[in-house]
Image (tube, rainbow, N blue to C red):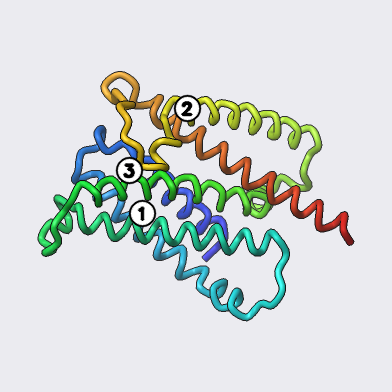
Amino acid sequence: MPLQVRLLMNAVAGGLLVAALAYDWLGNLTHELIGTAMFGLLIFHNAFNRRWYGSTARKGSRDLRGWLNIVTIGALAAAMLSLLVTSLIISRSLFSLLPIASSFGARQLHAQAAYWALVIVAVHVGMRWAMIMASMRAWLRLGTPSVGRTWILRALALAVAAYGVHSWMVMGTGSRLMAEMTLNLWNFEEAALRFFLHQGAIVALFVCLGHYATSLMQLRRKGSR
């Protein structure tokens, strides 16, 4: 399967994760359908990247970027596993017939795992952003990178990341990551679109952090040679 198609499927999975955060707007059944579709795409993603797990076990010494990649994927796997298990426990529609008793703690852990997954997925994407952009340039036949276009995109990324910091505070994402009780409930009747803009900006913030942290590590590695 072409890389661009796989990237599109991954983008859809990420979009579903963001959409699923709007539980109060979607309703329970739609929320569970979106979550199930996301996990289906996640299984597909891991099936295509299964060779990475074997190669990781065989590799010897690694640089800092390699270890950060392993830690990120391990943290993402833990977040997704927590999300999956708690989904089955608290299901009220698709898996409600399972003989598992729901609980407030499971619902709280489910929400916390969802926000951790959002942040870690964004970092994971950021660490591969150079490869993604190279693939898109080849697909769109843009040729070699333009210096002017590169700086315009960097300025745009900086602006979006700055808005992501603002969105982080508006949405109270830090409190949600720590599973702290909050009265910061979003009014979807008045600002549904703004909810998704804020969540998208938070994703963009961590994509930028992942990308530029990786770039700095690569520059440091080249400088030490």
Q: Nearer the viewer, residue 180 or 36?
A: 180
Q: Earlier in the sequence, mark 2 or mark 1?
A: 1
The residue singled out by tag 2 in the image is: 169
Nearer the observer: mark 2 or 1; the answer is 2
In the displayed structure, does residue 59 sit left or right of residue 45?
A: right
Which disc is residue 190 wearing? none
Q: Earlier in the sequence, mark 3 or mark 2?
A: 3
How far is the residue under mark 2 from the one under mark 1? 27 Å
- On the image, the x and y values in percent for residue 75 come to 49, 58
Identify the residue at image location x=65%, y=48%: 133
Badge 1: few (under 14), some or many (20 or more) residues near its Cα, within 10 Å? many
The kind of residue on which mark 3 rests is Ala
Q: Tell me whether circle 3 and circle 1 mark residues in contact (CB < 8 Å).
A: yes
How far is the residue under mark 3 from the one under mark 1? 9 Å
Q: Secondary structure at mark 1?
A: helix
Furthest toward the bottom, the residue is 58
The residue singled out by tag 3 in the image is: 20
In the displayed structure, does residue 158 sit left or right of residue 184?
A: right
The residue singled out by tag 1 in the image is: 38
Q: Quadrant of residue 52?
A: bottom right
The kind of residue on which mark 2 rests is Met
In the displayed structure, does residue 221 sit left or right of residue 40?
A: right
Q: Secondary structure at mark 3?
A: helix
Identify the residue at image location x=45%, y=54%: 9
- On the image, the x and y values in percent for residue 183 come to 30, 27
Q: Is residue 113 above or below residue 164?
A: below
The kind of residue on which mark 1 rests is Met
Badge 3: few (under 14), some or many (20 or more) residues near its Cα, within 10 Å? many
Q: Quadrant of the C terminus?
A: bottom right
Q: Secondary structure at mark 2?
A: helix
In the displayed structure, does residue 98 sit left or right of residue 47?
A: left
Q: Earlier in the sequence, mark 3 or mark 1?
A: 3
